[in-house]
Image (spheres, grey):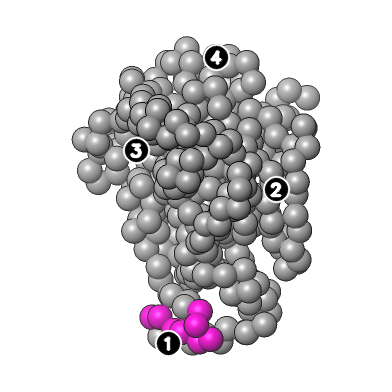
Amino acid sequence: MMILVYHFSMQNRKSGGIALAENFSIREISLFRAGGIAELYAEPRTTDELLSIMELASEKGLNIEVIGAGSHILAPESGIPGLLISTRSMKGITIRGDLLTAGPGEMLDGIINIAIDHKLIGLEELGGIPGTIAGALSINASANGRSISDAFFYADYVTPDGRMHRRTFYPDTFSLQDSAFSPDEIIVNVALRLKHSKATAEARLRKEKFVELMFIPPCRRCAGEVFRDLPDRKAADLIRQAGFIRDKNIRAEFSDYQSNCIFTYDGCTSDEIFTLILRTAEKVHKETGVLLEPSITLLGSFKEQWKELYRQSHQKKA
C-alpha cells in the first residue's frame, strides 16, 4: 500500500499518484454553490488510494469527512477542519449478465442510461435523481414508487478502521429512504441485479418521463430533496402543512412547486440555507410532532448542530 506524503507549503501536492489539495472551495462542487473551505481535500481513484489516504489521516490525527460527488452537501461558510475526501473519481462500470457493478463515483442517472444501452431495466423510475450511486444507496434514494434497494445485490464498503466489508441483500436491509449503511461506512463498490429486456426504447422513454416529472426550473439553484420521507408521510406534505418560512434575511426558500426542495438566490450563503432547514424542521416538529431527518449531507459544524436539535427534542419527549 502506498503512503501519501503531503506538504502544507504547496497548494496541490502529488505523491504516489494521489493528489491532496489545501484550502479547497466546497462551493465549487456543491449544487447550492455555497460553503466555505476544506482545510485538506482528496479524490482517490481506487480503493487502495482511499485506504492510503485514510491511513495517513489517522497517523496525522486528522478529522475525516467523506462525500460523493458533493452535489447533495451543505457545509458551513466557516469551512471544514481536517480532511474532506470525495469518492467521485472512483469510477468504473462492469456488466455481467444481469449484474451491473459500479464504482461509488458513477452518477446514478448515467448508470441508468448505460443499463438501458445493455438491455437492462429496473431503474427508470429513479431517472433525474442527482448524485452518485453510492450517495443514492446511502439514503436508499426513492422516487415514483421505486427505491434503489429494489435492485440492490451487494455493496463493498470501508469502515473507519480501514477494513473492507461486504453487505449483501436481506429483506430488512433497507426501508423507505433509510439505508443499512451508517454515515461512517464508505461505500466503494455497488452491485445491482437488473432485468433483461428488449424493450429498451420504451424503457428510455419511461426514464425520460420520470426525469421530466422531477424537473425543477433552472432559474434558481437547487440540490434535490432536503428531508427524508417517512414510511407513511411525505416530507413535502409535512412542510406544506406546517407552513413555509419566508424571511427577507434568508436568500433561500422551500419551493411551492416541490415543497421538499430549496431554491437559492444570488448571494445566498450556506449558513442561510442551514438556518432555513433548521427552522423548518423545528416548525414541522412543533406543528406535527414529527422531527424530520435530513436527506442532504450536513458537514462540519452543521452536523453537530443537527445532533443538538435531536438531543433537545428527545429531552422534551422525556
Q: Residue at x 32, y 27 (%)?
A: 212
Q: Where is mark 2, residue-wise?
A: 154
| Distance between the alpha carbons at the discs numbered 2 and 3 | 31 Å
Q: Quadrant of the C terminus?
A: top right
Q: Is residue 140 visible?
A: no
Q: Which residues are magenta?
A: 11-18
Q: Residues within 10 Å of mark 3 (few under 14, many from 20)?
A: many
The mark closer to the camera, 2 or 1, is 2
Q: Secondary structure at mark 4?
A: helix
Q: Looking at the image, do the residues carrying marks 4 and 3 touch, with CB atoms under 8 Å apart?
A: no
Q: Where is mark 4, residue-wise?
A: 287
**Any mark on residue 153, and which?**
none
Q: Position of residue 209 (x, y in %)?
A: 36, 26
Q: Residues within 10 Å of mark 2 (few under 14, many from 20)?
A: some
Q: Secondary structure at mark 2?
A: strand
Q: Amino acid at mark 4?
A: Glu
Q: Amino acid at mark 2?
A: Tyr
Between discs 4 and 3, the one toward the N terminus: 3
Q: Residue at x 49, y 23 (%)?
A: 144
Q: Looking at the image, do the residues carrying marks 2 and 1 touch, with CB atoms under 8 Å apart?
A: no
Q: Where is mark 3, residue-wise?
A: 222
User: Which residue occupies the foreground of this view, 244 or 111?
Assistant: 111
The mark closer to the camera, 2 or 3, is 2
Q: Quadrant of the N terminus?
A: bottom right
Q: Where is mark 1, residue-wise?
A: 9
Examine the rendered structure and indicate whether residue 176 appears above or below residue 224: above
User: Which residue occupies the foreground of this view, 41 or 17?
Assistant: 17
Between discs 2 and 1, the one toward the N terminus: 1
